[in-house]
Image (cartoon, rainbow, N blue to C red):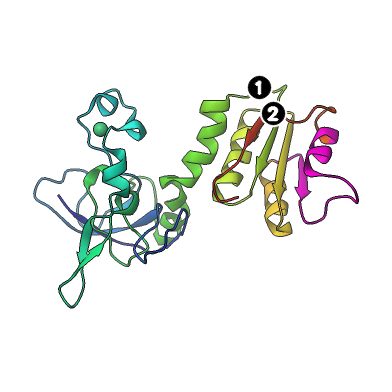
Amino acid sequence: MKVLPRTPTRLAHHRSADRTSTTIGSGYVRAVGKAVRVAQPGDPVLLSYNFCGSCIACKDKNLSYCEKFGPLNFGGRDTFTSAEGKGVPGSFFGQSSFANYSIVNEHSVVNVKDLVTDRKELQLFAPLGCGIGTGSGTVVNAAKPSSQDCVAVLGQGGVGLSAVMGARICGCRTIVSIDRVESRLQLAKELGATHTVNTEKLPEGKTLADVLREICDGVGPNRTSRPLSY
Ligand SMILES: [Zn+2]
């Protein structure tokens, strides 16, 4: 079962050294295998990780804990063929959507034909494949903060900003965004941060821990999110 989407976006979240990596992708299906049911040629789709669908974790709907998650998503098997006929590693995170065309299992495909109206919207939805779910899910589903909690998020990339939005949804009274790029901190404010800390501009003689304690009642945050990229 193979699906070949054309990727309008190449969002390099968790990108590795090879050219065909990336864990987030969106595009239009070019062709499908005979047994594929999730999409048809022309459908707009989002890409996410692969899973086996038959192990205990998968049957229990805990797909990210699939027993074969490692080999299916990080196995590095040859997916593409070069012009010289040599195998080219692909299927990173089940997709390798940094390539112009991805060959993926239908498990990695989410059909959004009833959700998006044009190519621009499809590009905006691409981060749902990993970044938004990771960031917001970490806060909303794992940390489960209340309106009384102080949340600190280190790193304001796609994952971190999604964590900020998750904290906002949870109604947290203090949401501290931490980064070294001012424009990212400004965006974090728009998305729900109550405070921002630029680690390149800490007050003289103070550490990040000192600043966080001052913002969060003298004791510091009781929920912390740190995306891997930070
Ligand atoms: Zn499985």
The one of 214 and 110 positioned closer to us in this rendering: 214
Q: Does 178 appear above or below 5?
A: above
Residues at circles 1 and 2 in contact by the CB criterion of under 8 Å: yes
Residue 113 appears anywhere in the view: no
Residue drawn where x is 23% and y is 57% of the image = 103
Start and end of the magenta stretch? Answer: 193-214
Which mark, by number, is residue 162? none
Left or right of 178 in this view: 124: left
* Residue 211 part of the magenta-drawn span: yes
Q: Position of residue 47 (x, y in %)?
A: 34, 50
Q: Position of residue 182 (x, y in %)?
A: 74, 58
As helix, strand or loop, the secondary structure at mark 1 comes to: loop
The one of 144 and 226 positioned closer to us in this rendering: 226
Quarter occupied by residue 222? top right
Q: Does 154 appear above or below 24?
A: above
Which mark, by number, is residue 172? 2
Q: Does 68 appear above or below 29?
A: above
Residue drawn where x is 42% and y is 59% of the image = 16
Left or right of 178 in this view: 8: left
Please name the residue that numbered disc 1 is placed on.
146
Going from the N terminus, do you reach mark 1 or mark 2 first? 1
